[in-house]
Image (tube, rainbow, N blue to C red):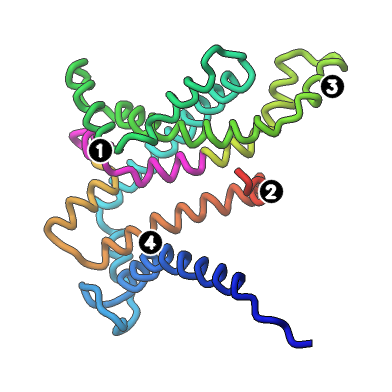
Amino acid sequence: MKRRFDLGNAAYYTLNGAILTFLLAPIAIVTVFALNPTPYISFPPVGVTWRWFDKFLSSPEFMDAFWLSFRVALAVLVLSMLIGGLCALALARGNLPGARLLTAFFMSPLMLPAILTGLALFQLYLILDIGRPVWGLIMGHTLVAVPYVLRTTLAVLHNFDRRIEEAAAVHGATPTRVFFEVTLPLIQPGVMAGGIFAFIVSFDQFPISLFLVPPRGETLPVVLFNYMKFDLDGAIAAASMVSILMAVSVVVLLEKVIGLKAYVKL
């Protein structure tokens, strides 16, 4: 029997395909630019070369900025998971008055333009006369990263079956043991999923870094911004590809460790 053409399904798949193409097209362009021998964007590409990756990896300026961004992102990852996870537990379990208002308050950094947040923190550091230390940059990144962990952890806690904790307590487990052996393992996927976003947001953070980078060091997004003022070659695309591959590697690693596919609803 001939299958009837479904206009609705066709429109649905066409629209999703168009959206996916729109989202992935910039990555494809960056990939072509990073592998193209010419020092400018050209299509079709005239060949394949690794010269821009070699230029990026052999540049002390790029590498120093890369490792500073990486160290800051790791610190933000740890801090955001600790702060966001504990805040989520307090909001979901603490019976706090105005819990919804507090949740909105902690999520507010996502509602403000990051450049305004960076400017406000820069002025605050000037008033407090603390300069621009690395820990100040970490605090600025953590401010905008915590909401991601908070949101994903609250999503897990919303569907959390507290009878599991009650069963452990009935069988003689102390509150501390219940937390570390029951509660924490169950909310771990939400915390780790938020941590992924926190790491990527920190590593690629530009507006806040622009105001708060230490005098003797710059993060990779700031270095790339300054580089493009005077030159625009494939090294920019190569740096972008390295950042994209690192972000994908983090997601794949955590998928292998804790199985994020089971928590795609987050």
Q: Quadrant of the N terminus?
A: bottom right
Q: Of residues 184 and 56, which is closer to you in this image?
A: 184
Q: What crowding class fits label 4: few (fewer than 14 Cα within 10 Å), some (14-19), or many (20 or more)?
A: some
- Tag 1–tag 2 contact (CB < 8 Å): no
Q: Of residues 21 and 235, which is closer to you in this image?
A: 21
What amino acid is found at the position of numbered circle 3 in the picture? Ala
What distance separates the C-alpha of mark 1 from that of mark 2? 35 Å
Q: Which residues are magenta?
A: 195-217
| Image mark for residue 167 | 3
Dot 1 falls on a residue whose secondary structure is helix
Q: Residue at x 51, y 54 (%)?
A: 249
Residue 138 drawn above or below residue 56: above
What amino acid is found at the position of numbered circle 1 in the picture? Ile
**Residue with the mark numbered 2:** 262
**Residue with the mark numbered 1:** 115
> Horizontal and vertical percent for residue 77?
47, 35
Q: What crowding class fits label 3: few (fewer than 14 Cα within 10 Å), some (14-19), or many (20 or more)?
A: few
What amino acid is found at the position of numbered circle 2 in the picture? Ala
Q: What crowding class fits label 2: few (fewer than 14 Cα within 10 Å), some (14-19), or many (20 or more)?
A: few
